[in-house]
Image: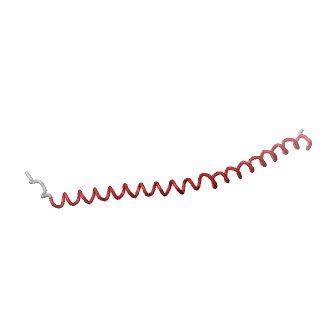
Amino acid sequence: MATGDSKRPWEQQLKDAAAHLETDLKNVVKYINDQVVPDVRQNGSDALRAAATELHKLAQRLDDHARRTATTPPPPKP
């Protein structure tokens, strides 16, 4: 049968592991906030600008196609 003394090293190891995990997690959160978030904000706005440019081009092609088909008479029916 296990005694209180045999549980103490296991409990201490668990507490130590939890403390290390908490420290590591704080470091990860700090890294994300300091390094990743600013890059995502910068690159995110660049990506939105690029997408806006491509959408503008697509809208222009759709307008051009609509103008061509509106002025071209339909083909004769057989």
Q: Please give the name of the residue rendered at 23% of the width and 56% of the height, measured from the top-left corner.
A: 65
Judged from this view, the residue extending furthest toward the left is 78
Q: Please give the name of the residue rendered at 58% of the width and 56% of the height, measured from the top-left corner.
A: 38
Horizontal and vertical percent for residue 33?
A: 63, 55
Using the image, determine if residue 19 lies above or below residue 55. Answer: above
Q: Nearer the viewer, residue 50 or 63?
A: 50
Quadrant assignment for the N terminus: top right
Horizontal and vertical percent for residue 60?
A: 29, 58
| Res. 58 image quadrant | bottom left
Q: Please give the name of the residue rendered at 84% of the width and 42% of the height, measured from the top-left corner.
A: 10
Horizontal and vertical percent for residue 53?
A: 38, 57
Horizontal and vertical percent for residue 63?
A: 26, 60
Count the labels in the image.
0
Report the coloring of the rendering: secondary structure
Q: Is residue 5 left or right of residue 27?
A: right
Judged from this view, the residue extending furthest toward the top is 1
Q: Please give the name of the residue rendered at 82% of the width and 43% of the height, measured from the top-left corner.
A: 13
Q: Is residue 58 left or right of residue 23?
A: left
Q: Is residue 18 left or right of residue 45?
A: right
Q: Nearer the viewer, residue 40 or 19?
A: 40
Using the image, determine if residue 10 lies above or below residue 60. Answer: above
